Image (cartoon, coloured by chain):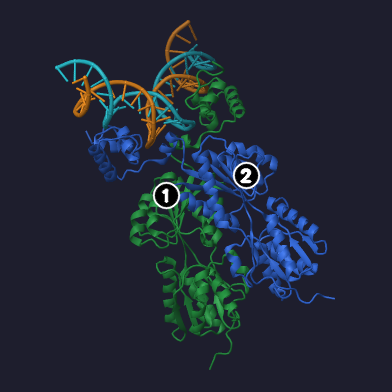
Chain colours: A green, B blue, C orange, D cyan
Amino acid sequence: MGRGHMARRNTNRRVGIADVAEKAGVSHATVSRVMNGNAAVDPGIAARVRAAAVELKYQPNPVGRSLALGKTDTIGIVVPDLANPTFQAILRGLSIAAAQDGYRVLIADSSEVTSEESILAGEARRRCDGVVLCAPRMSDAELEELAPTLHPLVLINRTTIATNTPSLSVDYGQGIQELAQHLVTLGHRRLAFLSGPEHSASNRQRLVGLDQFRAEHPEIELQMLHGGSNFDSGHESTEAIISSGATGILAFNDLVAMGLLSGLHERGIRVPEDISVTGFDDIPFAKYTTPPLTTAAVPINELGSLAWRRMREQIQQAGETATQAQDEFSPRVQIRKSTAAPALTPA
Amino acid sequence: MGRGHMARRNTNRRVGIADVAEKAGVSHATVSRVMNGNAAVDPGIAARVRAAAVELKYQPNPVGRSLALGKTDTIGIVVPDLANPTFQAILRGLSIAAAQDGYRVLIADSSEVTSEESILAGEARRRCDGVVLCAPRMSDAELEELAPTLHPLVLINRTTIATNTPSLSVDYGQGIQELAQHLVTLGHRRLAFLSGPEHSASNRQRLVGLDQFRAEHPEIELQMLHGGSNFDSGHESTEAIISSGATGILAFNDLVAMGLLSGLHERGIRVPEDISVTGFDDIPFAKYTTPPLTTAAVPINELGSLAWRRMREQIQQAGETATQAQDEFSPRVQIRKSTAAPALTPA
DNA sequence: ACGCTCTGAGAAAACGCTTTCTCATGATTC
DNA sequence: GAATCATGAGAAAGCGTTTTCTCAGAGCGT
């Protein structure tokens, strides 16, 4: 019979609201009230409670709060691959913006396993107040079925038929056309597109953009080469690029372009003197490749923070099924040193 | 009257354990039992419950579970800057490894605001079952005070006096010495170290490593230049590097090296013919710079997954205050094309 | 001085789950 | 056939909060 009554169930529990209440000589309810400033509490009592709280270093248990309040102050983000600078940037922007409003972010990396994405998203949603979904390869049908269960939801680079989920997308079709146009303006007549993953939604968009480009420029040769979405696939495509005879290369993204740059350099092919190369995304590294990479800049930091803003809007207007903003970003061609006029056209 | 008794508090609640119980004609407890496979349940009843569960698409509410079980199956990671590839890689490795064991990760980006780190870490800890802390600039005193509060905790690139928190660190001192040695072996006699942030623990380690190097190689000139930890600071140091007259440059990390590479290229200075440059970390991009970067490779992916392993060990042996593993990684010099013998020593 | 309103604190319910406790039922043993 | 046991399901407590409900007491007007 030392200090307390009997030892608590668990020997030394974390300090809880009950301890503060006891110390201040009030009820749990009152402690809760002063901690949250909800109802009016006698200033004297409030001070006593606050004193007890700091003395005991009391910090409310978030899990208990979450259960009572029905919200976790956390949002989830599911990304296909955390190694991709684009998603890293989105995650970063999202996390910082959310933090400013007192929210945290829980990450779910699907490791490109498309079949897991639905499940991951669902789990994330149950733990969080909302989900930001990046699922470039998920089928339209699956997305359409999943979306309503995830609400509040914001989609990155995807849209649904129902207009009640906000989406942020980049107009890849337009961007790639502008890059192609840039090359043509420089004088290139033989282009090649080093494509990305087959089922990627953004790759499809680039493809339709290029179809349009072809229609408008029947005189330009435009080859399609299969590739991937990372350095290595860019690097591996070096031979194919060289033997294509194209002088202007549109890489799927900056990573691929960098891999290609490195491959060309190894073969002694000069960029941009012999071949011009463009990327896509304008990741931070693009400025520092040699030569600095001409690319289509998507405002990647804004994407993350805007995603948060859209999420916040939904969380606040909880319930109302208003139609949500569909934001579309237009990439801006960022001309650097990896593109130039081609050498005198070979006879 | 209608179906149920009265309308529930909230009109259409998410389906809960009670709904399943009602549908299967059993008690909440039984549903919980079959969902968790804890106690023995009559196979027939179990089947009925499971059927009801799938029919109603019942998914246990994680918050309720967390409260009851006293664990969240989530760990937190606090990083100073999510834009840094090193932390991105750690985060990624951690997330993937943790996911394999059914854990999620909550991120807290302190945005380099050292004063917030303690608070962020504390909040993360309250929401999670453990915390991985990357706080290169936190003072030793603060860390020492914070650490016991956070347990289970794993430290990255920091250690505490008490040996009961596992830590993973990279031997930056040794790595930088080996790089310096590499340059000397190539024939360089005038070196410069482009240092990182002043209060960074890992920068200090490099500094003591270089002190040791100086002691062992009194004949080698080694200048210290102030820098930062990202591209831009590397780029901005270009002039200082050039006017230093050094032929072998040890950059704080790969980012700085890349910035420098780009700056030198703009000035028409050839790497490695005119100046040799080394980085540190071997981030994925290092392989694809032009020229590919000689650097000290730290097994960055392993760091993340090992961090998880150490965390898991602590979570499992809950309570036992055993002394914990202190892992130290030795960087391995990765020689690429950014270093070579210097031009004939100027008279 | 009585009753009225109003302020503010405690009791208790609610959040959604797990788990201990309790007890009924059917099986087992002498 | 009665006493003993094992099995397994329901009742209820507990996890740590918030919030509604209730009610005591103070302040006010008449």
Q: Is residue A326 visible?
A: no
Residue under numbered circle 2: B117
Residue at point 55% right, 25% down? A20
Amino acid residing under circle 2: Glu
Q: Residues within 10 Å of mark 2 (few under 14, many from 20)?
A: many
Instruction: Tell me where residue A229 appears, x and y as whole percent.
Output: 48, 68
Instruction: Name the residue tied to disc 1.
Output: A152
- B208 vs B246, nearest the viewer: B208
Q: Foreground: A330 or A276?
A: A276
User: In screen coordinates, is A112 left or right of B259?
Assistant: left
Residue A1's x, y, as percent?
54, 15
Residue B144 sits in which quadrant?
top right
Horizontal placement of A246 versus B116: left or right? left
- Label 2: chain letter: B
Q: CA distance from mark 2 to mark 1?
A: 30 Å
State which chain disc 1 sits on. A
Q: Are marks 2 and 1 in contact (CB under 8 Å)?
A: no
Determine the secondary structure under disc 2. helix
Q: Is residue B2 left or right of residue B18?
A: left
Residue A65 x, y percent position in the rendering: 47, 35
| Type of amino acid under label 1 | Pro
Which residue sits furthest bottom?
A: A347
Relative to residue A265, is residue B300 depicted above or below?
A: above
